[in-house]
Structure formats: structure tokens, C-alpha cells
Amino acid sequence: MGLGSFIKKQFIDVLQWTEDKEGVLAWRFPMADMEIQNGGVLVVRESQVAVFVNEGQIADVFGPGTHTLTTQTLPLLTNLKNWDKLFDSPFKSDVYFFSTRVQTGRKWGTQQPITIRDKDFDMIRVRAFGMYSYRVADPRKFYTELSGTREEYTRDDVEDQLRGILMATMASSLGSANVAFLDMAANQALMAQEVRGDLADAFARYGIGLDEFNVASVSLPEELQAALDERISAGMKGGLSADKMSGFTKFQTATAIPLAAQNEGGIAGIGAGLGAGVMLGQAMGQAVGSTLAPASSHPGAPAAAAAPAEEGIEARLEKLKGLLDKGLISAADYDSAKSELLKKLIG
């Protein structure tokens, strides 16, 4: 082996990283038994950072550019190695390159539903999916907290860690945000806004900068979605106002019809029951309305606002005819109720 080959093998004149492998975030320059030449050149490309580490302790950090390695350009390393004068011989030091390019189009999703508090539905479990992008923002923290002394640290390695952080942060952020699920589902940007600030802080602890975060979809597990659909169909959010009781009565009547059709006698067989149910719903609505009406505080107080006038008999007859036409009551029920109303009208 010639002297030139021996020198080339033992000493390093140029340190650089060409990033020839996709998805690598941190890469240790292969030193082996070689040493860095005094006055050697360090080439750091755009979207890269180079870090010198001496016996596990971070020393000098270099941004993009071409750097000549001397005691003037390596002040911290010079101090750690106790060079009290200009060194004129090769030295050993671990050199790590970090890619600071934005890692775009990374997908995230909840493998299991996240349980959160909801101001409308108390406790619910939600699923969500979207995209995010990030970059290495602080190589010192990234090296200390994540990559360490590995020969290379990849995107897959860091995203295993980020996935857990993302799920924990989402559960905490959404649980304390007091934003209703219906608002989140209608506006994914609102959900992303609630999570992004806390997520950026969590990522920063590891030297990672959150560049973008969005929510593509948010949904409930199938069984909860079915319960929500039923509640929405009933037109009820809670309480027993006259309007809500009327809506609930209509919902219960509508859902009873398909079941009635399967019973003996079909719709005709339960006509009386439906008629009774309608009357019961009206009675309950009137009762709730009278209960909610304000009462006078004392005998001398001004009279309270008059309750709405009782529905006219002609209007009630029209409603009964409408129920008959829709098949919700039988002809016998219609005739019976019509007779009673006409008696009241004629006196």
C-alpha cells in the first residue's frame, strides 16, 4: 500500500453528507479509526446542520456553508479538549449531520377512539384522521432526547414517538377545550386549531418544529353515531318543553308505524292506540306549557301574560283529517274524535 493511500485512509480532509438515503433525519459521519485533519473542510448543505460531539457532550454546531476546522471555528471543542495552543495534528470527534428539511404529507390517525368530555353528550369517543408536517428545529434537543449516538435515525423512528405524543395531546386538548362534537365535526379547522398549539409545545420538547397540522375527518364509533342519529331525528337535546315534547311524540309515532305493520292487524289493528298516543302527546304538551307559564308573585301583582288561546275546533278537525289521510289513525278513530269535537262546537 502506498504512502498516499495510507494517508487518505487515516485522515479526513472533507466532512459532508449527501443525503443519498430517503427519510434519514440524523446521520453520524463514519469515523472508524480515522481522524479529522487540522484545517480540514466541513461542508454543510442547505437544510442541514452539523454537530460536533466530544465524548458524548455536544460542542460546536454549524449551519449551512463551508467551514475550515481550526481552534477559531471550534471554540467549544477546543475548550473540551484542553487545547491551550493551536493544534497542528489530526483529532478525533464524532460528527453528526441533521436534516432540517420539512417532512411533508405525514399521515396521522386514531387507531383507537379517544374518550373526551363533550358539553352536549357528556362523555364520547371520537376518531380523527389528517395530515401533518414537521422538521428538526433544534439539533441539540433532538440529539439529546431522541437520536443519540445511533449511526442513523430515520423518519419512521421519530414518528413512532410522535404518534404517541399526538394522541395524548389530542385527548388533553379536546377534553379541556369545551368544544361540542357537533362543532368539531362541522368544522375540522376548529378542531385542528384547538390541538395545534398544544401539539407544537409537545413537539418542541424533542427539538421538533410542527410546520402544518390539519384534520381531514372526525367521526364517532358506529354505535355512538347510531345513537346520535336517533337523537337528532327526535329533534331533542334535552328538557321537556312543549315544542320538544311535540317533536318527541311525532318521532315515537313515526318509528312505531313500521313495527305496527309487522303485528297482527297491521295499522288498522293499532289505530286506537295511535289515536290515544296523539291525544296523550297533546295533553302532555299542554301540561308542560301550563307548568312553564309564569305565576303572579302576590295578589296585587299585574296579571301575567295571557296563555296562548286554545286551538280552535275547526283546526283540530283539520288535523284529524290529515292524520286520517296519512294513515296514522283509522276511520273509526277519526269518526269518534270528529263526533266529540262537533258536539263541543254545536253545544
Image (cartoon, rainbow, N blue to C red):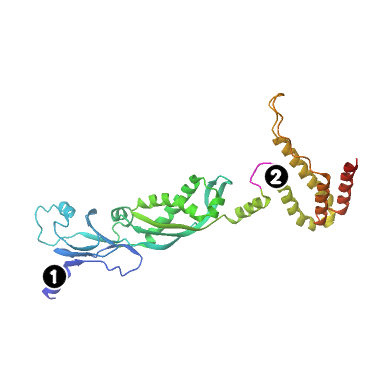
Is 325 magenta? The answer is no
Magenta residues, start to end: 236-241
Which image quadrant: the C terminus? top right
Which one is earlier in the sequence, the residue at label 2 or at label 1?
Answer: 1
In this rendering, position of residue 147 left or right of residue 324: left
Residue drawn at 49 percent across, 48 percent down = 174
Q: Which of 342 and 167 is in front in this view?
A: 342
Whether residue 115 is visible here, answered yes or no, is yes
Above or below residue 2? Residue 151 is: above
Which of the 4 image quarters holds residue 85? bottom left
x, y percent for residue 238 = 64, 44
Above or below residue 108? Residue 121 is: above
x, y percent for residue 327 = 81, 56
* CA–CA distance in space, label 2 to label 1: 92 Å
Q: Of the numbered discs in the image, which one, if any, rests on residue 7?
A: 1
x, y percent for residue 160 = 41, 58
The residue tagged 2 is: 243
In this rendering, position of residue 137 left or right of residue 247: left
Residue drawn at 56 percent across, 49 percent down = 124
Q: Of the numbered discs in the image, which one, if any, rests on residue 57?
A: none
Above or below residue 117? Residue 100 is: below
Q: Residues within 10 Å of mark 1 (few under 14, many from 20)?
A: few
Whether residue 33 is visible here, answered yes or no, is no
